[in-house]
Image (cartoon, rainbow, N blue to C red):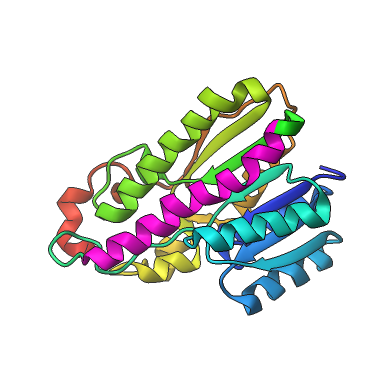
């Protein structure tokens, strides 16, 4: 990763923060994006502690114009973006059809799907001109396995995001651009606070840690250009019934 430029969205916390730190440890200069400047400063400090180089570029990925400006600013400073890691994602507590609001649907899809597209569009032209680039989208276990827990907007947006990754490989592989969808199982991140019933400390102790996914991102980013990891599913060794397809039996308890 020495000399490479990586742009990590959702870099202020969770998997995005861990990915940014790992990529910096690997030698990349990492630009972290997110909505909260204080969180981005924290990530930049962690990158520095790890001996890496990091920058912050505040942006709401659901804002198309803001993403275009951020991408252009990074390219102006560095001349290239070798790796895009899209970790920006969200969900809402009122996620089931009985109380899902259209505005919440729009927000979840706007961040999880539209934002991922905007960031992809911002980096593709420069990658195409250099005939090299890697786009990693952190998707979800629920993009591959039907689930009650994620709710309508989250599950739909993540399944669509998986399709977006495959389309990158179909259209852009001839230009040396690779797409990868990472599907994490249950992971301890701040997003879990948005669940109708957040998992207990005992359950969280058995889940993936954000650092686990950071190492996965680094592994993919360090793979040679002739290797395309199209999809990778990562789950805790301990897999709750919720992740095994039996969550419908537990639906009242989940809510």
Asked whether 139 or 196 is in front, the reply is: 139
In this picture, residue 81 sits left or right of residue 60: right
**Can residue 229 be seen by looking at this rendering?**
yes
Q: Which quadrant does the C terminus fall into?
A: bottom left
Outermost residue toward the bottom? 38
Rendered image quadrant of residue 29: bottom right
Q: Residue at x 81, y 49 (%)?
A: 28
**Can residue 220 be seen by looking at this rendering?**
no
Give how far across and how far down residue 5 sits, in percent: 78, 48
Q: Residue at x 19, y 55 (%)?
A: 250
In this picture, residue 209 sits left or right of residue 201: right
Give how far across and how far down residue 234 sits, in percent: 50, 41
Asked whether 92 or 37 is in front, the reply is: 37
Q: Residue at x 53, y 31 (%)?
A: 168
Q: Is residue 124 magenta?
A: yes
Above-or-below relation of 111 to 155:
below
Q: Residue at x 32, y 38 (%)?
A: 145
Q: Is residue 39 magenta?
A: no
Q: Which quadrant does the N terminus fall into?
A: top right
Asked whether 143 or 160 is in front, the reply is: 160
Above-or-below relation of 43 to 185:
below
Give how far across and how far down residue 16 sits, in percent: 60, 58
Give how far across and how far down residue 197 sits, in percent: 29, 69
Magenta stretch mostly in which secondary structure?
A: helix
What span is colored magenta in the figure?
Answer: 101-128
Outermost residue toward the left? 98
In this picture, residue 145 sits left or right of residue 80: left
């Amino acid at each position: 990763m020495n000399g490479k430029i990586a742009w990590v969205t959702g870099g202020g916390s969770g998997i995005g923060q861990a990915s940014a730190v790992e990529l910096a440890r690997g030698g990349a200069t990492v630009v972290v994006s997110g909505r909260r400047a204080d969180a981005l400063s924290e990530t930049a400090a962690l990158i520095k502690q790890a001996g890496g180089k990091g920058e912050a570029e505040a942006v709401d990925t659901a804002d198309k114009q803001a993403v275009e400006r951020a991408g252009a600013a990074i390219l102006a400073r560095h001349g290239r973006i070798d790796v895009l890691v899209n970790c920006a994602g969200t969900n809402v507590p009122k996620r089931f059809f009985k109380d899902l609001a259209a505005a919440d649907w729009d927000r979840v899809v706007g961040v999880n799907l539209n934002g991922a597209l905007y960031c992809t569009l911002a980096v593709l032209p420069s990658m195409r001109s250099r005939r090299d680039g890697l786009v990693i989208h952190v998707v979800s276990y629920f993009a591959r396995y039907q689930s009650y827990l994620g709710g309508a907007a989250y599950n739909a947006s993540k399944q669509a995001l998986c399709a977006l990754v495959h389309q990158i490989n179909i259209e852009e592989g001839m230009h040396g651009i690779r797409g990868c969808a990472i599907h994490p199982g249950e992971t301890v991140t701040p997003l879990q606070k948005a669940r109708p019933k957040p998992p207990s400390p005992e359950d969280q102790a058995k889940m993936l840690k954000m650092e686990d996914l950071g190492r996965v991102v680094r592994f993919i980013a360090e793979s040679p250009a002739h290797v395309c990891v199209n999809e990778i599913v990562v789950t805790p060794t301990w897999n709750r019934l919720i992740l095994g397809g039996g969550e419908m039996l537990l639906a009242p308890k989940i809510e």
